[in-house]
């Protein structure tokens, strides 16, 4: 793989909670990379450290040791303000429970991150309407989250994740709250984001449907990660 | 590309949108919060307006008397104090000071009851020398000076009692006819009724005594020498300059109100801060996850603090507007129902109350902001 093509590179990432006898090693020297246009799915049992890993990669949590490089920037070396900037400019989040702001419309939820990035009113509006249209939400822009279905909410969340044109999309169980059909649509959209828009997409999921869109599949268990893409059954029944 | 100032406003306005929508998500709670702030603003502003109105009113009478100095009994400091001077002092002052004194008159001023349709009403009767007019009524509609058996009453007394020109009023078993309505004789708890000195001596029961001597000087710069001469020749008397007499009277009448004003302002500020604080805190706790989302998508702690403070400021600003409208309405109503209560709100007071509301809102944001500062954005990964 071409090193320059890496959107995300994680080296020897370790996270230990607590101290002494009560210490829990949530991540143990985890290494992974995601390239532009690549969909990487991380699977594993509950409590394996998937959310911890995603939190550290997204700059929401600091590691005990190891490095996270996003577009060549070592996130772990940045102060809180710098990590907020990376989250704003380089990373888009898609969450299991959508995490939209209930008081805002679909369009305003997307505009929110654009406002923070300094895009003025009309430009922000154009960009958010364009993204929502691209994700099949034309005509739903002024609906509030409670007026949208689960699939629609997740589309709004993807639009918000794409708003600032980030290099990396981090998706945490993006299909967990959706039925089978909607779940398949959402992972299909995330693949489209990677292939058509050239983003790196890292999906953490229990959902077997996510495997269908993956370029590579990683297995995280007991804090350690391994590539199972080529293992028998990885893309079929596990 | 828009100019930086427009961009700055645009970003600021965008965050206001979030703050406003958060507030409006629970309209009843928001309405109660605004009313809570409005109540505080109303409480503080109305009392301030009454205080200003009172302090402004009590000066009016003394300011209307064209005297440079007031002679009082030694130890008396103000118009409401007990002052008894021998009647002959007026003539003595006139005789000895003819070269520097333009006019000098005795003034009788005593609290008394007037009887209107059998009902007593406490007022201050003023007997004055109609030849000099010193200490008499000001801005009179109708007849002035009053003749024997006639009185001029203050406008507020007319409003309070319903007395008008041509009506009769009883004072100490003698009946007087109202011939004029004057202005500037309202002391809130009492009003002035003016009559000729001769009538005052008869009904106020102070023969051979005057309460004050008011002196109009030919040259006001000679006030100190006049003071010295009078106090040397009449050691029982004290001469007070007009400005000092005004200050003393105002201080005497308002000193009891100041602690009350301070208490009202403090109570108002506590109530307002508590109402806004409780609402903003509840709103912050309820939306902790949403703040976590904002943090996760790249907002800094300061951005989140700004949303919280903006929410408090919006509630404060609306509460301030509603509160001031209430005060203006109440002032108007008070002028009709209780005309003796004059109200005055100056621009300085309005700005002061606005600053207090601002401080109230910012203070109310403190605890929610501290709670937000401890927010762990990993909360967003919880299902």
Image (cartoon, grey):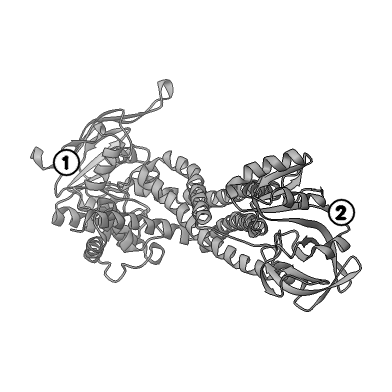
Residue A6 in the image: above or below residue A188:
above
Residue B164 in percent (x, y) is at: 75, 76
Q: Is residue B381 above or below residue B351?
A: above
Asked whether, in this view, residue A29 is left or right of residue B359, the answer is left
| Residue A86: mark in rendering | none
Q: Is residue A196 left or right of residue B173?
A: left
The reply to whether callout 1 and callout 2 are in contact (CB within 8 Å) is no
> Could you say which quadrant of the image residue B22 lies in?
bottom left
Q: Nearer the viewer, mark 1 or mark 2?
A: 2
Q: Provide the chain ID for the residue under circle 1.
A: A
- Is there any visible trace of residue A152 in the rendered image? no
Q: Residue furthest right?
A: B173
Q: Which residue is mark 2?
A: B208
Q: Chain of mark 2?
A: B
Q: Which residue is mark 1?
A: A71
Q: Observer-nearest residue: B208 or B285? A: B208
**B250 or B48, which is in the foreground?**
B250
A217 to the left or right of A179: left
Label 1 and label 2: CA atoms lie apart by 103 Å
Identify the residue shown where x is 25% and y is 51%: A117
Q: Quadrant of the N terminus of chain B?
A: bottom left
Horizontal and vertical percent for residue A100?
Answer: 36, 56
Classed neighbour count for the residue bearing mark 2: other residues with Cα under 10 Å, few (<14), some (14–19), many (≥20): few
For numbered disc 2, what is the local secondary structure? loop
Give me the residue at 79% from left, 49% from top.
B89
At 23% from the left edge and 41% from the top edge, which residue is drawn? A218
């Amino acid at each position: 793989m071409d090193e320059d093509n890496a959107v995300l590179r994680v080296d020897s990432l370790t996270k230990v909670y607590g101290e002494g006898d009560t210490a829990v090693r949530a991540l143990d020297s985890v290494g992974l990379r995601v390239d532009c246009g690549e969909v990487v799915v991380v699977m594993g049992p509950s409590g394996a450290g998937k959310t911890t890993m995603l939190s550290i990669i997204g700059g929401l949590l600091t590691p005990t040791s190891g490095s996270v490089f996003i577009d060549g920037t070592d996130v772990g070396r940045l102060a809180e303000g710098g990590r907020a900037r990376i989250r704003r400019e380089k990373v888009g989040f898609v969450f299991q429970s959508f995490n939209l702001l209930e008081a805002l419309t679909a369009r305003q939820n997307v505009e929110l991150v654009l406002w923070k990035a300094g895009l003025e009113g009309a430009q922000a509006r154009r960009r958010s309407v364009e993204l929502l249209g691209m994700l099949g939400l034309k005509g739903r822009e002024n609906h509030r989250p409670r007026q949208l279905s689960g699939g629609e909410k997740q589309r709004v969340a993807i639009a918000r994740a794409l708003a600032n044109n980030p290099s990396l999309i981090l998706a945490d169980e993006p299909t967990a709250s959706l039925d089978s059909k909607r779940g398949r649509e959402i992972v299909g959209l995330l693949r489209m984001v990677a292939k058509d828009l050239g983003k790196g997409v890292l999906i953490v999921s229990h959902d077997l449907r996510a495997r269908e869109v993956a370029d590579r599949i990683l297995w995280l268990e007991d804090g350690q990660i391994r590539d199972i893409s080529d293992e028998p059954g990885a893309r079929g029944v596990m | 590309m828009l100019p930086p100032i427009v961009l700055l406003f645009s970003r600021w306005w965008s965050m206001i949108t979030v703050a406003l929508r958060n507030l409006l998500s629970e309209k009843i709670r928001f309405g109660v919060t605004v009313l809570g702030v409005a109540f505080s603003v109303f409480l503080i502003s109305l009392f301030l307006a009454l205080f200003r109105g009172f302090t402004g009113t009590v000066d009016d009478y003394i300011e209307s008397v064209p005297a440079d100095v007031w002679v009082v009994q030694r130890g008396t400091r103000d118009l409401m104090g007990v002052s008894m001077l021998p009647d002959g002092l007026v003539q003595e002052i006139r005789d000895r000071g003819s070269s520097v004194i333009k006019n000098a008159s005795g003034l009788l001023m005593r609290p008394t009851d007037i009887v209107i349709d059998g009902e007593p009403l406490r007022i201050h009767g003023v007997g004055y020398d109609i030849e000099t007019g010193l200490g008499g009524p000001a801005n009179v509609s109708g007849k002035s000076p009053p003749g024997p058996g006639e009185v001029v009453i203050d406008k507020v007394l007319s409003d309070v009692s319903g007395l008008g020109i041509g009506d009769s009023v009883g004072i100490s078993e003698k009946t007087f006819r109202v011939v004029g309505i004057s202005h500037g004789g309202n002391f809130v708890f009492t009003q002035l009724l003016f009559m000729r000195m001769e009538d005052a001596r008869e009904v106020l029961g102070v023969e051979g005594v005057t309460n004050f001597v008011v002196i109009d000087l030919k040259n006001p710069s000679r006030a100190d020498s006049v003071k010295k001469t009078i106090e040397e020749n009449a050691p029982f008397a004290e001469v007070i300059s007009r400005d000092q007499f005004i200050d003393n009277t105002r201080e005497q009448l308002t000193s009891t109100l100041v602690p009350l004003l301070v208490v009202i302002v403090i109570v108002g500020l506590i109530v307002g801060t508590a109402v806004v604080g409780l609402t903003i805190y509840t709103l912050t706790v309820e939306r902790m996850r949403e703040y976590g989302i904002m943090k996760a998508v790249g907002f800094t702690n300061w951005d989140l603090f700004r949303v919280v403070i903006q929410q408090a400021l919006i509630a404060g600003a609306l509460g301030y507007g509603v509160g001031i409208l209430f005060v203006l309405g109440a002032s108007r109503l008070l002028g009709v129902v209780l005309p003796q209560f004059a109200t005055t709100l100056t621009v300085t007071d309005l700005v002061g109350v606005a600053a207090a509301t601002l401080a109230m809102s910012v203070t109310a944001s403190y605890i929610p902001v501290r709670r937000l500062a401890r927010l762990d954005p990993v909360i967003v990964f919880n299902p």
